[in-house]
């Protein structure tokens, strides 16, 4: 089965080497076929207990994801080409950050760490184009442009910095580490940048949630940029959760606000609005992320 898998990989690359003049659309169809066939082979390997990662269910999950990606590329080859380019670019950058981090901290990360990096890279690559387009279309006025640019910047930075933080084994920083007394502040530059991205995401997410609750007219759901920013934060708190410390007041207030707004917006918009359901789910996940924060005096 492994040999047949390698044959499929080679067969997918041969058209690109022998026929370099192939159109970009043909490249999408080749990538879609490779993704579907590879996904099927991975599912077969998982059922036979031949998981190369020591976990057949993980291999099967990767196979299902590959089939879904291939079907989406076949269903929308035009947008699929753009999404494929963004995904490859972001995945290369995020994995590059993770590998560079390991050069400064040589240790063997857990499988869950690499899964976290892969999910961050995939979510960022798949939604980057949508987030950029929504920033251009939905930003109205000076305030709207400032809010859109800041959220987009935090969404792009989040997967990259979380990849670095995961490989270092550090938890998500709290607002006290960024703005609190000297005894709580972190001396790590990357933790400071991650804290700024977290703060920007928190403020904008809360502002949008309150706006959709009290004045939903002419407001759009920034689900793409919020997903790019929130998913890495959630995975980081699940993987590197602080073992001790007190629950910060600021994060608790933001978490409660987001949770209450999510419930109200979900009922107000109804189940037919998929963007509303997606955004409300993000608000709830972000509330869970913030509720896990624990503050302790810096040991650095």
Image (cartoon, grey):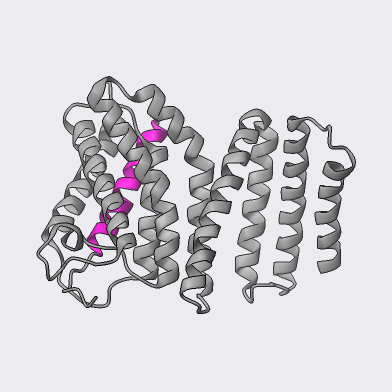
Asked if one can make out residue 245 in the rendered structure from this viewpoint, the answer is yes
Which residue is found at the position 40% from the left and 69% from the top?
239
Image location of residue 46, percent across then percent down? 70, 68
167 vs 283, left or right, is right
On screen, residue 95 above or below 206:
below
205 vs 55, left or right, is left
Dominant secondary structure (helix, strand or loop) of the stretch shown in magenta: helix
Extreme residue toward the right, this view: 18
On screen, residue 22 above or below 193:
above
Which residue is found at the position 25% from the left and 65% from the top?
292
105 vs 222, left or right, is right
Asked if one can make out residue 1 in the rendered structure from this viewpoint, the answer is no
Name which quarter of the figure residue 237 lies in: bottom left
Is residue 277 part of the magenta span, yes or no? yes
Image location of residue 85, percent across then percent down? 62, 40
Which residue is found at the position 18% from the left and 51% from the top?
254
Image location of residue 74, percent across then percent down? 70, 36
24 vs 202, left or right, is right
Which span is picked out in magenta?
273-292
Is residue 22 part of the magenta span, yes or no? no
Q: Quadrant of the N terminus?
A: bottom right
On screen, residue 196 above or below 107:
above
Q: Quadrant of the C terminus?
A: bottom left
On screen, residue 224 above or below 160:
above
């Amino acid at each position: 089965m492994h040999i047949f898998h390698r044959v499929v990989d080679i067969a997918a690359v041969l058209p690109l080497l022998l026929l370099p003049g192939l159109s970009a659309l043909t490249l999408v169809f080749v990538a879609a076929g490779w993704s579907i066939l590879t996904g099927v082979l991975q599912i077969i390997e998982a059922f036979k207990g031949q998981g190369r990662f020591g976990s057949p269910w993980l291999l099967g999950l990767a196979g299902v994801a590959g089939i879904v990606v291939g079907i989406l590329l076949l269903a929308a080859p035009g947008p699929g080409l753009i999404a494929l380019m963004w995904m490859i670019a972001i995945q290369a950058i995020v994995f590059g950050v993770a590998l560079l981090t390991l050069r400064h901290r040589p240790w063997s990360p857990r499988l869950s760490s690499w899964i976290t990096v892969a999910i961050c890279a995939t979510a960022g690559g798949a939604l980057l184009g949508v987030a950029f387009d929504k920033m251009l279309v939905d930003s109205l006025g000076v305030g709207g442009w400032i809010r859109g640019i800041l959220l987009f910047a935090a969404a792009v930075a989040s997967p990259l910095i979380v990849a670095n933080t995961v490989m270092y084994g550090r938890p998500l920083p709290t607002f006290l580490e960024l703005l609190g007394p000297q005894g709580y502040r972190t001396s790590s530059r990357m933790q400071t940048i991650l804290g700024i991205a977290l703060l920007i995401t928190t403020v904008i997410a809360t502002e949008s949630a309150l706006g959709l609750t009290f004045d939903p007219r002419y407001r759009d759901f920034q689900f793409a940029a919020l997903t790019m920013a929130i998913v890495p934060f959630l995975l980081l708190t699940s993987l590197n959760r602080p073992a001790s410390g007190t629950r910060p007041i600021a994060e608790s207030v933001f978490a409660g606000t987001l949770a209450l707004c999510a419930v109200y917006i979900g009922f107000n918009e109804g189940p037919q609005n998929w963007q509303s359901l997606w955004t409300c789910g993000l608000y709830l996940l972000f509330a869970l992320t913030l509720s896990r924060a624990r503050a302790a005096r810096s040991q650095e």
